Image (tube, grey):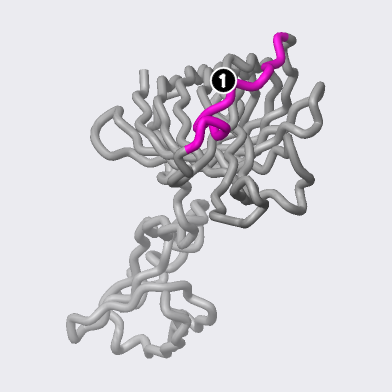
Amino acid sequence: MKKLLSLVFSTLLSFAAISQNNIDVIHLKNGKSYKGNIIEQAPNSYYVIQSLNDSTYKFYINEIEKLTKEIAEPQKSQSRKEYIAKHPRNFISISSGVSISNVPYYSSAEESQILITPLASLYFEKGISKRFFLRGAACFNTIGNKYPFIYTDINGTIIGQTNIKTSFDFLSGILSVGYKSNTKVQLFANIGTGVSYMYSAKSELEGDLPISPIYNKTNILEKEDKPNLLLNAELGFRYKIYKSIYFHHAVSATKYFINNNYGFLMITSGISLGI
C-alpha cells in the first residue's frame, strides 16, 4: 500500500512540472528504464509511455519501481552551418596574364586575326563592408591584330607570305566597385570605369623577310594623344595558400568609349596579399 501511495504521489508531482523540456522516465524493477512521454495512464493499474524514438510501451504497476522526470537534451540542428569567412577586408594584388583582342587598323575585321599578348596589372582593394569593395587598378597591356601580308619581287611574282602585326600599347587606370562571396573559395565580381593612355603604336612584319631595302621590319604608327575612357567588368575567384597570401584567377572584358574599335578580353592570375 505504501508503494502504491508513493507511486501515485510521484505521478502527481511529475504532471505538476511546468517545464516543457522535461521528459518522463519509468524505472522498472528489473533495472531497465524507459524515457519519453506518458501518453496514457491508470495509476492503480498501468502506464503507457511513448519513447524518444516514437515506440510505445505499456507497463503494469507491479513492474514499476518509480517514476521520475529528466531535463531533455536539446536536439542537434541538422542544418549545415554557414562558413564564417576570415578573409582580410583589404588586398594588394599583382597579376599577369594575356590580353586577347582583334582591333582592325589596315584591314577589315573579317580579314584580321586575333592578337594574344602578355599583360601586367597592379591593384589595391578596399573593403567597404563584409561583401562589397572598392578597387583601384593600373594595367599595362597591348591590343591589336594580325593579318596576312604577301610580298612579291619586282616582276610581281609572289615570293613569300607572312603576317603584319599591328599593336597599341596602353597604360590604364580603372576604379571599380565589386561584390565578394562569404565562402572558403572567395568569388568576386566588379564593374568600373577608367581612363587609358596609348604610349606606343606600331606595325611589325613577323617571320623571315626578303633581303631588300623596301621592306622594313617595324613601322611606327601615329598614336592617339587623347585619353580613352573605358568600361571594365571582371569575374574571378581567390583562395588562401598561406596565412594572408592568396592566389587569384580572373577574366575581364574592357571596352573603350571614345574609340569603339578598341576592346579586349583579359585572362589573369596572380598573388594577393591581405592587409
For the point 76% across and 42% down, the residue is 107
Magenta-colored span: 212-225
Q: Amino acid at mark 1?
A: Arg
Q: Is residue 213 magenta?
A: yes
- At mark 1, the secondary structure is strand
The answer to whether any part of residue 161 appears in the image is yes
For the point 41% across and 56% down, the residue is 74
Task: Name the residue beneath numbered marker 1.
Answer: 135
Observer-nearest residue: 265 or 114? 114
Q: Quadrant of the N terminus?
A: bottom left
Q: Is residue 269 left or right of residue 130?
A: left
Q: Where does the image place residue 262, in percent across and percent down from the top left?
A: 72, 32
Q: Is residue 57 left or right of residue 194?
A: left
Q: Residues within 10 Å of mark 1 (few under 14, many from 20)?
A: many
For the point 41% across and 71% down, the residue is 8
The prevailing secondary structure element of the residues shown in magenta is loop
Looking at the rendering, which quadrant does residue 261 occupy?
top right
For the point 36% across and 86% down, the residue is 61
Q: Where does the image place residue 138, in percent across and percent down from the top left?
A: 53, 18
Q: Where does the image place residue 203, in percent across and percent down from the top left?
A: 59, 31
